[in-house]
Amino acid sequence: MKVLITGASGLLGRAVVRNFKAAGHSVVGTAYSRANDELIKLDLTDSEQVEKLLNNIKPEVIVHCAAERRPDVAEKDHEGTLKLNAKVPGDLALYAKIHGVMLIYISTDYVFNGTNPPYQADDLPDPINFYGESKLAGEQAIRDIHPASVILRVPILYGDVLFNGESAVNLLIDSVKNTNKPAEMDNYCLRYPTNVDDVGRVIKDLAVYKIEKGRSIEGTYHFTAEEMLTKYDMCCIFADLLNVSKDHLQPQNSISGSASASRPKDCHLSTTRLQTDGIDVSFVPFRTWFQSYLSP
Ligand SMILES: NC(=O)c1ccc[n+]([C@@H]2O[C@H](COP(=O)([O-])OP(=O)(O)OC[C@H]3O[C@@H](n4cnc5c(N)ncnc54)[C@H](OP(=O)(O)O)[C@@H]3O)[C@@H](O)[C@H]2O)c1
């Protein structure tokens, strides 16, 4: 398959590139500020530039990973976030529809309010922060324009980072290592940290099932690892693996009224639909992966 991957310089995009390349597919990755010899520079908010590149590459599959994924940044820049997270998916959906291309859009568990897990792929979304709203608007644009596209929702991601701030999970390692800096740590929101290489495999399998095996793969899917951990739980695992004290970290067992309005408690995603379609939903255990990642 000839696959175009947007956001290929990002945490998930790099893993998607790895997975398609390892399976022998032809991959073109695009990046924005981190374009290099291997990644084509593309400003996705420039629709003319996008159309020109797509007409040039003629991909069979587009995996759209690029987005503003930081809820705090999204909150501060509604206009810029909507441009990238909602308008761009619509532009890609139109191209995919006209040219018969498979479009895979990556969305988030934050489209749910977190009060009634586990969430099935057809449950009603109800985002409680602007990031979730913007990603849902991207989903909606795709459903309206080209409903045969795939929307894959995933939870908080971790993996091999260039710097810990690339992942809200890897970032916790810095808090754990800073033993002389007391910090409050969320022990309220239940998360299901998922490795980007497992997500990359699922995305590649969805494309293979549709394009190579001719199966009917369309609409909304959920993928997640199944270990329920708060950020404090993750820190305890890191402290243990790094053999450092966690006494400087205070578990925050409840959140104040204003914070609870923007932080969903439990957005556990159900992978039933992927399993029904025969896609492998296995995942690497959190501790096992970090044990090897953190070992010298
Ligand atoms: N990370 C998570 O925990 C998480 C959880 C749930 C869902 N998701 C979703 O998963 C997807 C991938 O997230 P990620 O963590 O890999 O994000 P990331 O590491 O922040 O990467 C974002 C990517 O978007 C690109 N980009 C930004 N603005 C662009 C523009 N104007 N034109 C073209 N490209 C642009 C960036 O390119 P440069 O870096 O080269 O500028 C980068 O490659 C997103 O859709 C996100 O919403 C992520």
Image (cartoon, helix red, strand yellow):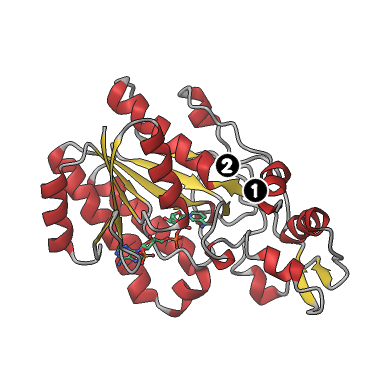
Helix, strand or loop status at disc 2: loop
Q: Residues within 10 Å of mark 1 (few under 14, many from 20)?
A: many
Q: Which quarter of the rendering shows the N terminus? A: top left
Report the Cα–Cα distance between label 1 and label 2.
Answer: 7 Å
Q: Are marks 1 and 2 in contact (CB under 8 Å)?
A: yes
Q: Residue 193 in the image: state x and y as whole percent.
A: 63, 50
Q: Residue 93 in the image: state x and y as whole percent.
A: 24, 48
- Residue drawn 69% across and 63% down? 173
Residue 224 tag number? 2
Residue with the most extreme front position: 296
Camera-nearest residue between 123 and 99: 99
Placement of 257 over or under 64, stated as above or below: below
- Residue drawn 47% across and 68% down? 130
- Residue drawn 54% across and 58% down? 161
Q: Residue 192 in the image: state x and y as whole percent.
A: 65, 48
Placement of 270 over or under 265, stated as above or below: above
Name the residue type under label 1: Tyr
Q: Which residue is mark 1?
A: 192
Q: Mark 1 or mark 2, which has the lower sequence index?
A: 1
Whether residue 217 is visible to the viewer of this picture, yes or no, is no
Residue 13 tag number? none
| Displayed-image quarter of ligand 1 | bottom left
Q: Residue 78 in the image: state x and y as whole percent.
A: 39, 75
- Residue drawn 68% across and 45% down? 292
Q: Residues within 10 Å of mark 2 (few under 14, many from 20)?
A: many
Helix, strand or loop status at disc 1: loop
Give the image quarter of residue 112.
bottom right
Whether residue 276 is visible to the viewer of this picture, yes or no, is yes
Name the residue type under label 2: Thr
